[in-house]
Image: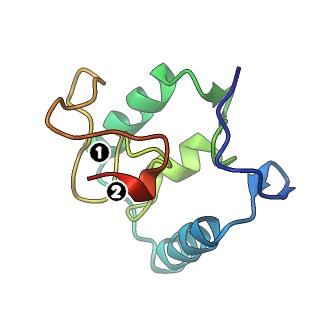
């Protein structure tokens, strides 16, 4: 069974939430400024996404984004914190770091 980020209405598979709006705004700014993550960071993010059980072919099953595009943009973040801007919540093996508390709601993480 797939997890979902709340019961927000969706357009083209993307939930319409304030978090989605902020993420799309950051993505638009990155696209306009041609602000891309480094090649090594892109590969690290893509490897994490490939191993994710919530991946739905070429899209994230949680936020609906196209994984290839999301991993390229410098200011993108995983909706459940597996990778984020400037700080990795996942080690190089793709496993969550043990010193961070995890919850189902990214806004409640400590």
Q: Residue at x 40, y 29 (%)?
A: 48
In the depicted view, which residue is nearer to us: 99 or 62? 99
Q: Nearer the viewer, residue 66 or 94?
A: 94
Report whether residue 68 is seen: yes
Packing grade of label 2 (10 A; few <14, some 14-19, many >=20) is some
Name the residue nearer the viewer: 5 or 54. 5
**What residue does disc 2 label?**
37
Compared across the picture, whether 29 is left or right of 108 comes to right
Sort mark 1 into few (<14), some (14-19) or many (20+) by Cα contacts within 10 Å: some
Q: Quadrant of residue 39?
A: top left
Distance between the alpha carbons at the discs numbered 2 and 1: 6 Å
The residue singled out by tag 1 in the image is 41
Q: Is residue 39 above or below residue 93?
A: below
Residue 92 x %, y %: 21, 27
Is residue 110 rendered to the left or right of residue 53? left
Residue 25: quadrant of the picture? bottom right
Q: Looking at the image, is 22 positioned above or below residue 49? A: below
* Residue ID at (55%, 42%): 68
Residue 101 lies, in percent from the top left, at: 26, 40
Quadrant of the frame with the N terminus: top right
Picture coordinates of residue 2, whole percent (x, y): 69, 26
Q: Is residue 33 above or below residue 52?
A: below
């Amino acid at each position: 069974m797939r997890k979902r980020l709340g019961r927000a209405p969706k357009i083209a598979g993307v939930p319409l939430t304030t978090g989605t709006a902020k993420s799309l705004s950051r993505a638009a700014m990155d696209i306009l400024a041609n602000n891309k993550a480094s090649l090594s960071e892109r590969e690290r993010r893509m490897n994490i996404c490939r191993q994710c059980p919530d991946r739905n072919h070429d899209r994230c099953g949680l936020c609906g984004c196209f994984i290839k595009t999301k991993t390229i943009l410098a200011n993108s973040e995983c909706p459940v914190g597996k990778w984020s801007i400037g700080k990795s919540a996942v080690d190089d093996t793709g496993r969550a770091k043990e010193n961070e508390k995890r919850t189902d709601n990214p806004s409640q993480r400590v």
